[in-house]
Image: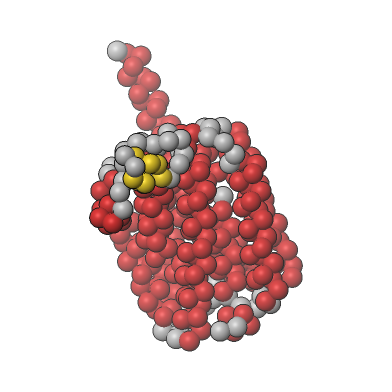
């Protein structure tokens, strides 16, 4: 399988993009990830803004170089993955809570978690591109997965989970000693002469395994937006690279986005149906972008408005009491 078979992007662009991402990760680690400390909201906002700016500037260059249509596909894929990432932040918050990971060590776990997610997404996207290039009917499977996921999002509620009982942790404990003790942000400590995995490492394992589950949603979603492998790869990777910074920006109020999951259900349902009808109805990329943006804006504003109304009612009740 060569690059020209799955994408309009030449081989040099694949190489340059990958090298650029690795360099950005090293810069990110050196500037924002040094030492054990709680990440300040202002710093997280700055970092998140930088990642978004990098993605949009690359999107602009790519659209100029390879066409507006692919540019729209890139932006749509980026927006879909970014919105799914926001929903995933709530799960990450529960994982840190379950393992009682202090704020000062969370950024290190998230850095390696994002790094692992980049590798996993790259493998899955390239595999998915090869399947789509070889078997057109895989499109229908991806579309069906998205529709089923949309229904699941509408039916399920965000419940408290105990990540320490995750299947991956139970399996790990059968083959590797673990401990409740920590030594700073170390993944392993010596305890009684035995090297044991700390809760920091266990939290990282659960985050990586959880991303495998999330990939089942996000990979078909991005291929519903574009069938160009590089567009799928680049938009997906750039969206999740800012996940660590986004976590520290939204961690305090991500749970208040009560209409995010229904909004994501509508988005996944829309692009799932779009994929199922691809051989009959061709929906332009700019229309998909407008639909997704409108749904996310509606979900965000609705969540904010309802929260504001509830706060006013609470304040009135407290006043009369």
Q: Quadrant of the N terminus?
A: bottom right
In the depicted view, which residue is nearer to us: 127 or 276? 127
Residue at point 39%, 36% (across, down) = 182
Quarter of the figure with the C terminus: top left
Up-down relation of residue 77 to residue 141 (above or below) = above
- Which residue lies most toward the front here? 193
Q: Is residue 242 visible?
A: yes
Image point 53% across, 35% down: which residue? 36
Spot occupied by residue 112 in the image (x, y as percentages of width and height):
50, 51
| Color theme of the render | secondary structure
Give left or right: position of 65 versus 169.
Answer: right
**Is residue 33 toward the left or the right of residue 143 in the image?**
right
| Residue 209, image x, y percentages | 37, 57
Q: How many marks?
A: 0
Q: Tell me if residue 310 comes above or below residue 283 in the rendering.
A: above
In the foreground, 235 or 225: 235
Residue 92 visible in the shown view: no
Residue drawn where x is 52% and y is 60% of the image: 118
Front one among 49 and 280: 49
Q: Residue at x 44, y 69 (%)?
A: 220
Q: Position of residue 201 (x, y in %)?
A: 40, 47
- Left or right: where does residue 173 sit relative to residue 215? left
**Residue 186's x, y, as percent?**
45, 41
Foreground residue among 256 and 42? 42
């Amino acid at each position: 399988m060569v690059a020209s078979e799955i994408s309009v992007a030449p081989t040099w662009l694949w190489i340059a993009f990958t090298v650029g991402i690795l360099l950005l990760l090293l810069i990110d680690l050196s500037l924002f990830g040094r030492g054990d400390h709680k990440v300040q909201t202002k710093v997280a906002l700055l970092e998140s803004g930088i990642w978004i700016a990098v993605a949009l500037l690359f999107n602009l260059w790519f659209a100029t170089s390879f066409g507006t249509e692919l540019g729209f596909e890139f932006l749509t894929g980026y927006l879909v993955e970014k919105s799914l990432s926001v929903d995933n932040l709530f799960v990450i918050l529960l994982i840190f809570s379950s393992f009682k990971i202090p704020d000062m060590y969370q950024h290190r776990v998230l850095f390696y978690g994002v790094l692992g997610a980049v590798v996993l997404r790259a493998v899955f996207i390239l595999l998915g591109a090869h399947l789509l290039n070889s078997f057109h009917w895989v499109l229908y499977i991806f579309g069906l997965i998205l529709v089923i996921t949309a229904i699941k999002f509408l039916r399920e509620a965000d419940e408290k989970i105990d990540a320490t009982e995750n299947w991956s942790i139970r399996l790990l404990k059968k083959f590797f000693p673990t401990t409740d003790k920590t030594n700073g942000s170390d993944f392993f400590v010596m305890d009684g002469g035995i090297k044991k995995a700390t809760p920091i490492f266990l939290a990282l394992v659960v985050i990586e395994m959880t991303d495998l589950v999330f990939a089942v949603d996000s990979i078909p979603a991005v291929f519903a937006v574009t069938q160009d492998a590089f567009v799928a790869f680049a938009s997906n990777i750039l969206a999740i690279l800012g996940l660590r910074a986004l976590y520290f920006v939204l961690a305090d109020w991500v749970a208040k986005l009560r209409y995010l999951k229904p909004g994501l259900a509508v988005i996944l349902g829309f692009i799932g149906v779009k994929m199922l009808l691809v051989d009959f109805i061709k929906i332009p990329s700019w229309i998909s972008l407008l639909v997704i943006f409108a749904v996310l804006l509606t979900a965000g504003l609705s969540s904010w408005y309802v929260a504001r109304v509830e706060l006013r009612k609470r304040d009135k009740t407290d006043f009369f009491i």
